[in-house]
Amino acid sequence: MRLSTGNLKNINVPGLQKPGMEIFELPTKVLQFGTGVLLRGLPDYFIDKANRQGIFNGRVVVVKSTDTGSADDFAKQDGLYTIYSKGIENGKEVSEQVICSSISWVLSAAKDWAAILKLATSPDLQIIISNTTEVGIQLVEEDINQQPPLSYPGKLLAILYERYKAFDGSAVSGLVIIPTELITDNGKKLKSIVLDLARFNKLPGEFINWIENHNTFCNSLVDRIVPGKPAKELAAALEEERGYSDSLHIMSETYCLWAIEGDQRVASILSFCKADGRVVITPDIEIYRELKLRVLNGSHTLSCAVAIISGLDTVKEAMDNAGFSKFITELAYKEIIPSIPYKIEPDVAVDFARKVLDRFRNPHIRHEWLSISMQYSTKIKMRVIPLLLNYYKLKNTVPANMALGFAAFIRFMKIEKQNDGAYKGSINGREYNVTDSQAGYFAQVWQNGHADQVVEKVLSNKNLWDTDLTKLPGFKEEVSKNLKRIMAAGEKEITTTELHQL
């Protein structure tokens, strides 16, 4: 039996939260760009929870922007999917199983653009959410009359213009727009790009004023580890236990936070915040952003290639390794926390780091390092470079663990372009795919260079980092030393203890 609205009546599992049939009659209030597990495991989770409590009373239509993958499973399951959350809270194991019913439909930007524009004219629509990765919020000077525009800001602008025309620019027709991409001031940046693109398309000044004055672009931050589908063995066991199959099933940790920058008006529109205190609407989210971006994401990013080179596949497996655990703990407490470019009370940062490391040790979450490596170079730039520069500003000496993380990253990016256009690397005799907007650059740099040359070219590339990292005293030399020792091991599997001693 497959999960679907028609089969809900046949599903009776103790502890499993099911939606009531009245939820399927709720209007579409949210247009969401992205079908990824993070959006499904956090914003969509909160909206579903609020609907169950009769608070928000609106559903989500999701726009699938890319050509990869299929939306067939969403159609077959009527947008339903199971969220299985497990974690440790206050020393006790906690879990939750929910059939999430917030998504009503998934539309393809390529195939269903007319329907998406039609939805933009709905009086029920109030909110737009996105997660298009850090590279998704970029200015692409394009004609928004394309069917559809290529970029996410282009699509968003086309939707806003359609709505503006449908409601004659009325003040009440404006939307609350919440990007969740992990970049600084994501709402402000998206608004700036949309306005620039509107001017590029020579759209009416009245429309541009409507964007500026009657639509609210919120900076926001999402924090939840959602690795995706459960492992095959667990999935099979859960299917047998529940009596239904679910192709969209996702695992997550129990911890979650959605911090949104906004006022009372925003809070009234985002009424789902009343259903769960972990949705925080506040005038300033900077402390949440810095802690998450630097401590959690920064330590993940700097540790990713170190773990992969060490032959460790998952975060939990790495945390069980004494050498790696020592590396990431020292990285977090001795190098990242002191370097956070925002005034945070030390005990607050230390407490957050402790919780982060506990979350990494969650035995129920299989979070693969290779999935964390997506858009690796962009993550280094956004999450790590400000820490590195601030560390030097404060101490003017080499942060040893950051240097090791950087060397491992450069080794990870030793890749070659394949006949199908994909980029692949190999470590410890194991091949892996690299998804990175700078993959071509790294393949070229590695083509004829040895370690010292590669390090010099990569660290001095201002297009990558907006600064010349070779100017940091001793950093280039330390990264080169680490890289050469990593490469000297050849195909021999390197242990994290050995890496820590480099």
Image: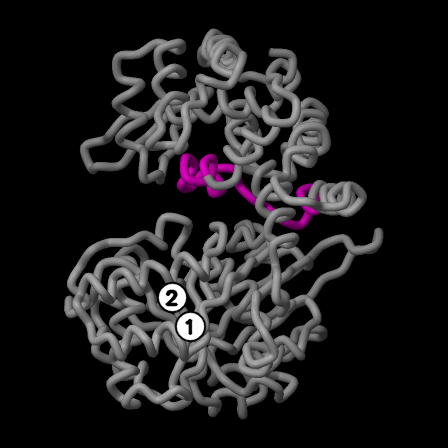
Give SS at disc 2: strand
From the image, which quarter does the C terminus lie in? top right
Question: Magenta span has 380?
Answer: yes
The numbered mark at residue 413 is none
Q: Which contiguous range is marked in magenta?
A: 359-381
Question: Magenta span has 417?
Answer: no
Q: Is residue 358 visible?
A: no
- What percent of the width, then of the height, locates residue 387? 57, 34
The answer to whether residue 124 is left or right of residue 270 is left
331 in relation to 366, above or below? above
120 in relation to 201, above or below? below
- What percent of the width, then of the height, locates residue 240? 59, 64
Dividing the picture into quadrants, the one containing residue 212 is bottom left
Q: Nearer the viewer, residue 492 or 397?
A: 397
Dividing the picture into quadrants, the one containing residue 439 is top left
Identify the residue shown where x is 21% and y is 37%: 421
The numbered mark at residue 33 is 2
Kindly check if marks 2 and 1 are in contact, taking CB atoms under 8 A apart as contact.
yes
Identify the residue shown where x is 68% and y is 66%: 278
Identify the residue shown where x is 40% and y is 76%: 213
Nearer mark to the viewer, of 2 and 1: 1
The numbered mark at residue 128 is 1
